[in-house]
Amino acid sequence: MPDDIVLTAEPRTVVGSRPAGRLRREGKVPAVVYGLDTDTVKVTVPARELQHILSGEAGANALITLRCDGDDILTLARQIQRHPTRGDLVHVDFVRIRRDVAVQAEIPVHLEGEPAGVRDGGIVEQLVFSLSIEAKPADIPNAIEADVSALEIGSQLRIEELAVPAGVTVLNEPDELVVQVVVPRVVEEPEAPEEGEELEGEAAEGEVPAGETPSEGEAPAAEGGEAAEGESGGE
């Protein structure tokens, strides 16, 4: 389950792209805090500390207590925006939550074990990599582990068969296919013609097809690139 982490936040009074850029150069991330029928509050948080939190095991589902002007606000980080090439944090929304009220979250699905079918030449195909769930903040798991060690070739595992912790409701369709073990697909390549074999309908290089003669006024080039008799070179 996600750990509760304290992150210091500072009120933010300036808005706009230029002030936001200046804050990022100072190592701060512009953010807003909203939810639970309260006014939206503009803040900044330390970029390095927030990046460390989000790259941890709980990721975006880490419970973050924002400490701002003497108030502690329990939140989840949502709408995390990053620079498209550098990956730097650009902006974050923090949603106020209560420990006794369920919230929605996305959690990853991790496969555990080696399927028996793989040892027989099959391959694993994972079709679902995350689940949409609803749970109280303290009950949100870091991930759902799917044991696939018993899967034979042709076997499948569906969402309704996953081991989900108590207090967690999965919002995906229960019959949705999570993973299966299948026979490898073999792609047949077209056979290449044997050496010396000509493609039907194509004349060999330098040959004139049977029954045809060179066009009037057209003489075949002499071997070695010399002009045909009667033609003057260099004129």
Image (cartoon, rainbow, N blue to C red):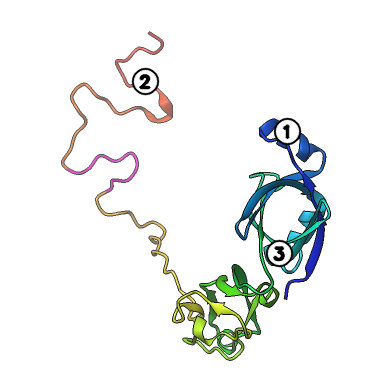
Local secondary structure at mark 2:
loop
Could you tell me residue 127's position as x and y percent? Answer: 51, 72
Viewer-closest of 121 and 234? 121
- Magenta part of the chain: 202-210
What residue does disc 3 label? Answer: 59
The amino acid type, in three-letter code, at marker 1 is: Pro
Using the image, determine if residue 71 lies above or below residue 168.
above
Residue 100 appears in view: yes
Q: Left or right? Give the position of 196 relative to 76.
A: left
The amino acid type, in three-letter code, at marker 2 is: Ala
| Of the two numbered discs 2 and 1 in the rendering, the one whose residue sits closer to the viewer | 1
Q: Would you say residue 222 sits in the magenta stretch?
A: no
**Residue occupying the point 52% across, 75% down:** 125
What residue does disc 2 label? Answer: 227
Could you tell me residue 51's position as x and y percent? Answer: 77, 55
- Crowd band around label 2 with a 10 angstrom C-alpha radius: few (<14), some (14–19), many (20+): some
Q: Tell me whether the residue at label 3 lies in contact with that at label 1, contact meaning CB atoms closer than 8 angstroms.
A: no
CA separation in Å, label 3 and label 2: 78 Å
Q: Would you say residue 205 sits in the magenta stretch?
A: yes
- Crowd band around label 1 with a 10 angstrom C-alpha radius: few (<14), some (14–19), many (20+): few
**Residue occupying the point 80% across, 64% down:** 5
Q: Left or right? Give the position of 95 relative to 45.
A: left
Q: Report which quarter residue 76 is drawn in.
A: bottom right
**Residue occupying the point 78% across, 68% down:** 4
Using the image, determine if residue 195 lies above or below residue 19.
below
Label 3 vs 2, first from the N-terminus: 3
